[in-house]
Amino acid sequence: MAAKVILNPYAGRWKALKRLAEVETVLQEAHIEYELTITESPGHGTSLAFQSVLNGFNPIISAGGDGSVSEVVNGMMMAVKENPKIQMPSLGIMPLGSANDLAINLELPTDLKEAAKVIAAGNVYKMDLGLVNDRYFDNNSAVGLEPTITLIQQDIKHIHGVLRYLLATLIGINRNPQWTMHIEWEGGEYFGPLTLVTVGNNPLTGGLFYMTPNADPFDGLLTFVYGYMSTRFEILRLLPRTMKRGKGSYIENPNIHEINSTWLRIRSETPTPMHADGEIQSGAIQAVEYRVIPGCLPLLMK
C-alpha cells in the first residue's frame, strides 16, 4: 500500500508550504509511492491520519513540526483504539518545524533527503507514548510554568525558532507564577507549592531545554520532574542548567526531583494551563492524569 503524507503548511511559520515541491522530490527520489494531503486547519491532521489508517495506508508520514506529528499520532491511535482488528501502520517523519524536537531526540535526520531515505529503508522501532487525560503525546507534556511559557510564545509573532522559545521563557520567569498541587505516582506523593511539573517521553523540548534529561521513549516509563523555586532569581539562575543533559543539569538542584513511573496524578488547588507536545490542551485545568502506553507506536528510524 502507498504511504500517506500529511503535510501541515503552517509548520515553521508557513515555511513548510514553500517546501512542498522539495518534499515531493525527495520522496520520488527515494522511490516511495505516496499520496499527499495538505491540512487545512488545526486538528485536520488528526482526522486525516484517522481515515488513513482505516484506508490501509502504510506508512503514514507526518511532514511538519512537532505539533503536526502529535496530531497524526493521535489520529493513528484513535483509529486503532476504535478498530482493534486494524494493524497500526508505521510512522515516518519529515521535519519541517521550527524546533523539530522529536526528530532531534530520536536522532532522525532533519535534512529532507536523508529523512526520505530513512523512511524508504523501512526499519521499525516500537516507541512508547504518553497519555494525558484523553490526549496522546510523543515528546512531552506539562502543567505549571512550561505551558505558561507556551502560551506566551504563541503570542510572539515577529521572532521565530528557538529564539522565540527563549524570549517567552524569560517573560514567563519574570511573571513567576506558582501553584499548590497534590501529585501522586507509583511509590510516592507530594503536596505543596510547585513551579513546574513536566512529563517527558523524550529529554528535549522547545529546541533548547532538557526538561526531563533522562527520559527514554523505549523504556516503558514516563519520566517526570517537579520542583518549586520561590523567587524569579532562583528560576533565572536555574535556567541555563535546563539546557544541559548530563553533569550540571538542573535536576541536580535539591529542590528539583526527577522520577520514573508508569502513571502520575495531579490535583491543583488553582487552575493551571496544560500542554501536550507544545499544543495547549487547556488554559485552566485542575485535574490531570498521565500514564504510559508502552511500545505502541511503530516508528521508522535509522
Image (cartoon, rainbow, N blue to C red):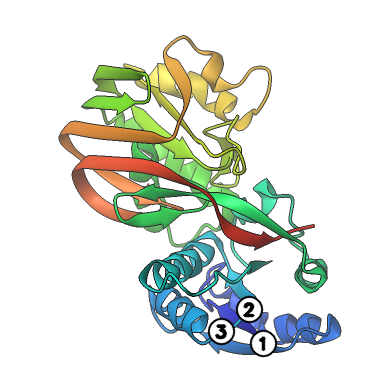
Q: Which residue is label 1 attached to?
A: 1
Residue 116, horizontal then vertical, whole percent? 77, 73
Which residue is more in the foreground, 64 or 157?
Answer: 64
Taking the image as shown, residue 49 lies to the left or right of residue 123, namely left
Would you say the residues marked 2 and 3 are in contact, meaning their CB atoms lie under 8 Å apart?
yes
Q: Quadrant of residue 302?
A: bottom right
Taking the image as drawn, is residue 141 in sight? no
Which residue is more in the foreground, 176 or 91?
Answer: 91
Question: Residue at the top extreme?
Answer: 254
Would you say the residues marked 1 and 2 are in contact, meaning their CB atoms lie under 8 Å apart?
yes
Taking the image as drawn, is residue 134 in sight? yes
Q: Which residue is label 3 attached to?
A: 56
Name the residue: 64% across, 75% down. 59
Q: Secondary structure at mark 1?
A: loop
Would you say the residues marked 1 and 3 are in contact, meaning their CB atoms lie under 8 Å apart?
yes
Amino acid marked by disc 3: Gly
Residue 27, horizontal then vertical, whole percent? 76, 82
Graded by Cα atoms within 10 Å as few (under 14), some (14 to 19) or many (20 or more), the crowding at tag 2 reads many
Q: Of the two numbered discs 1 and 3 on the same chain, state the one appearing first in sequence.
A: 1
Amino acid marked by disc 1: Met
